Amino acid sequence: MTVMHRQNTLFLGHENVILKEKKEKPYRLTPFIITFCEDTLTSIDIQNFIEMGLRIIRFKMTHVTRNDKLKLITMLNNAVKLCCEKYEVSNWPIAISIDIPNACIRTGFLKDEIKEPQIYLSEQSIVELTSEVQYWNQCDEHRVFIDDPYTLKLVKPGTEVSLCFGEIVMFCTEVISPKTVMCKVERGGYLGNVRFVCVRGVIHKRPPLTKKDVELLQFAKEFEADIVTIHSIRYPDTIKKIRNYFNGTRVPLIISTICEQEGLNNIDAIIENSDGVILAREFLAHEIVDKHKMTAIQLIVNAKCRKGGKPLYISGNILEETLQNGLLANTDIADITNIVLQGCGFVLRAYTDASYVLTAMRILDSICKSVESISPKDDFWRMSMEFKTPVNAAEACILSCALLVKQSESQVVILPTVTGRTAIQLAHIAPEAIILTLSSNPIVARKLQLYRGIIPIIYSKKPLKNWQDEMMARIEFAVAYGIKRDILKYGNMYVALRKSTPTSSFCDNVSCWKVVSEETKKHSSLQNMVWPTEFDKKLNEYDAMELPGQQLPAANAYTPLDHVLNLDIKSPPGCQRLTGIFATMGKSTNDVETMEKMIASGMNVAVLNLCYGSREEHVETIKMLRQAAKNYSAKMGRNYPLAIATRLAGRKIRTGRIAESYGETVELKTGEVVRITTDETYRERCSTYTVYVDFIYFADQISKGDYILLDNETIMLKVEMISTSTLTCKIERGGFLGSYKDVFVPNVVFNMPNYSDRDKLDIEMAVRHQIDIIIASFVHSPVAITELRSLLGEKGKKIAIIANIQTIEGFRNFDDILAVTNGIMITRQELGSDITPKKLVIAQKNMIARANICNVPVSVSAHLLSSMRYKKIPLRAELLDIANCILDGVDALVLSAETAVGQYPTETVACLASSCKEAEACVWTKQIFHDLIDKTSLPCDQATGSALAAVLAAQRTIAAAIIVITTTGKSAQIVAKYRPRCPIIAVTRYAPIARQLHMWRGIIPLIYEDSPDTDWSIDLEKRYTFCMKWAMEQGFIRIGDPIILVSGWKQGSGYTNTMRIIYATADIIVL
């Protein structure tokens, strides 16, 4: 069923793929083999075939003398030499295949007295078939010799016998002896010398590998043939015998040809032991019991070959009309199209004229290019799942390379190779890519011709001393080759897969490049802060095979239900928290020691709420925070990048101060009446009867019947009467009101400035004291963000802006706000009042998802751990709320009153940190990764492609960390977008960049303070080593763990295009 679906996917559910305008591929991916017969070709003919794209030549040498065989080889060598001279290349890798008949059944020779090259067997005539040896050269219209006595003796009356691939069909009427049967001809035709014989439904008993076959194998061994094609393979033991025959010498690739039912019965073992398979339809159609099953057999064998990673070629009825007389049959087009869609190659067999072969090649080339350009490309994920998690680093690099090709819409992969194994694996997982391989070994290059999509290039230049220079020289050589042959054009993206060092045992470096004009000359030319803490459990506390935080059965599930069913409560959480923690400062945190403890417990960003306190108090808090970070850095031995954020009052309306005669609060009782006034005389003397609000036009913009919410919805008033500056309200829900509490009116958008005079002074203070983040409150539209950027001016242009969404207007304009802001904060307190609490869950999930797609960091504020203001133990409902926020996709969580005025600020941060780790283990990162890829525009840029490759590699190898070398932080942010399960260590020299990176999920910013090395590559390796050593000291990387490295190809920002995989070692030196 799977194979049937694959064939039909082009037409069912892929209408857009077909209808979308596609450019024809610059190079045919589908390979084909041409069988050369004796005495029919010249060197010029072969040269023409090579220029038309011939990659593999199969020599049919069964009845050819040794001298004639040498003549054929000489003609090929001369043709290759002519091509090399014409196109000014040193070598042209054409693979040679020697044909071994093996157990095929053939007729004998015609009688000498018959002067014609063939005889006609007429319908209804009676013909004797015999295996008596004396008749081997005595064939005529009445008697035909068959060279297989083992099979002939199994023929019974009614058995169908076909000669010349069905041109002549007869049925046995009488068995005379074990060596002779009589047959009646049902379909007449011409019979020549040594023609193939097929017997339907009879098990073949002829032993494999005759003396003639051994002679051909010896010839293949002597002249080092690249490929040996074995006919009539019925059992895998035959393949093993042939491999043993080549022991001690270079073993050619072995292609097994399936000609009979026995081969189909053992197809799995044959595929496993072969390097490739030919499905000989010209034989099978006349051998299997039910000839109508041929289509199904082709699909099944193709599926098995694809699963086994072996190429499949189709032989029989491929442009036979064209090869015989130069004409094209209509049925050929449909057949060839289906074969191309199935990813198979072709074998062109018998021909009568060399010009007909050229015609057939042109037809094949045209159809292949057209069909390949519209083939659906959604098989990647299905094929990638064939690699069982965890994959090794080599497999992960291949998968990442294939994904990078897919997402960047690169048509070409450049791959320097020694053995060709990586190219073969890549061709299987990325069947739509053109893979330019570079090898200094012509033998490897020729053998790679067998595989779909691979163009082998022989690189014969003298190696350079520096490895990196040598790799770049090879890549540049391939780019020039591609440009010269129109495989690459200026502006095209291409991917390079190579080794990072000469000692690497596999291709561990994936990079994405663009062809630019210069390439023709020099071709391009502590846990907190999501930091480790003393409270984190170290990886070395677990057994070597334990993978804390992975929940692998759930992570690798295929459906949401299976994901949830496989979650295991006994599985430990990850060692490293990925979700950021914002904690608001207040009277409960107003000393350096408490701040230092909060950092140690997990605080990433310290928030100053400028609605409370004086500017002088906030300046003092900033100084204390920096001192706390300095103290903690001294303990950690590393510069700890604590970020500081200020939260502007913005469009927030607050009450005045409670009169001293009432104490700290007044009680507003349900059912009673209270006046809301903007009269300044009541600013400092609010009471039970009158409450001041600080927006002078408040009464002008309120309507009768509106509800006014005070102090986080604790108190609800209903407007009953309106005067110039005063509202008379009925208390619908009473409570105790303190000083300077928030005022909110649901579904009312006030016409008021985005920033008050006080806000502007606060902004000046933030710029002056180099604050990292400013949180703009009550953002209704993008205008508020652009206005804030203007107020920040040149000196504050590097300060990150977070838009606080608190109203339904902000929700409605969310996409426009996303386009201009650096981050989003969803404050559920006011937002829930504006859209009703019941709709809050929808709004939260919707906004988080939209922010995730745009890679804008999003945080959630309000009511996270409210109970911990007074108690050390949180409510279970709060812990579930935190988990749901993380499952929704938040980057960070914001603690407000819980830490600002709560009794247990340090414990609250620690509780949130541990809760996050438990929830993070439940995230279905695999599906999120797939979903985000689907929403990524194509083609993606180089940095995005590298990030995708890194996250896929981390996912499939179960990497301990992704290390990103970054200047601006952008590369780390892109990696974070795709939600890897492991932490992202962003190494930068710029402390402000490091501090702002706390806004993104999973990023651990690390400041590298050593002076730059003059050699950029050495400097890069020093930063990797520094990062690895630190991570191993902190205990979330252990020896042997896979590590993903992401960097650029040169110094500076904007050059990220490379992904590597290494394993952590005790000496923590990256080479």
Image: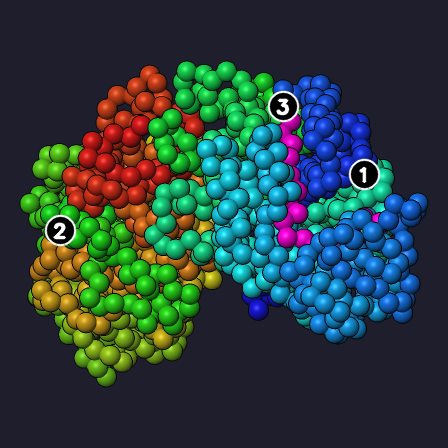
Disc 1 from disc 3: Cα separation: 23 Å
Q: Tags 2 and 3 in contact by the CB under 8 Å rule?
A: no
Disc 1 target residue: 358
Q: Which mark is residue 85?
A: none
What amino acid is labelled 3 in the image? Asn
Disc 1 from disc 2: Cα separation: 68 Å
Disc 2 target residue: 541
At 55% from the left edge and 30% from the top edge, which residue is drawn? 443
Label 3: how many Cα within 10 Å (few below 14, some 14–19, many 20+): some
Give the SS element for disc 2: helix
At 29% from the left edge and 39% from the top edge, which residue is drawn? 1063
Mark 2 against mark 3, which lies toward the viewer? Answer: 3
What amino acid is labelled 2 in the image? Glu
Q: Give the range drawn in magenta.
A: 92-110
Nearer to the camera, 194 or 28: 194
Disc 2 from disc 3: Cα separation: 57 Å
Q: Which of marks 2 and 3 is nearer the N terminus?
A: 3
Label 2: how many Cα within 10 Å (few below 14, some 14–19, many 20+): few
Q: Compared to 482, does 749 lie above or below? A: below
At 78% from the left edge and 53% from the top edge, which residue is drawn? 135
Q: Which quarter of the image is occupied by the C terminus?
A: top left
> In the visual, does 775 lie left or right of 289?
left
Q: Where is residue 34 in the image (x, y as percent from the top left)?
A: 72, 41
Q: Which quarter of the image is occupied by the N terminus?
A: bottom right
Disc 3 target residue: 91
Q: Which of marks 1 and 2 is nearer the N terminus?
A: 1
> In the visual, does 675 lie left or right of 39?
left
Q: Tags 1 and 2 in contact by the CB under 8 Å rule?
A: no
Give the SS element for disc 1: helix
Does residue 107 belong to the magenta stretch?
A: yes
Does residue 420 belong to the magenta stretch?
A: no
At 64% from the left edge and 27% from the top edge, which residue is drawn? 92
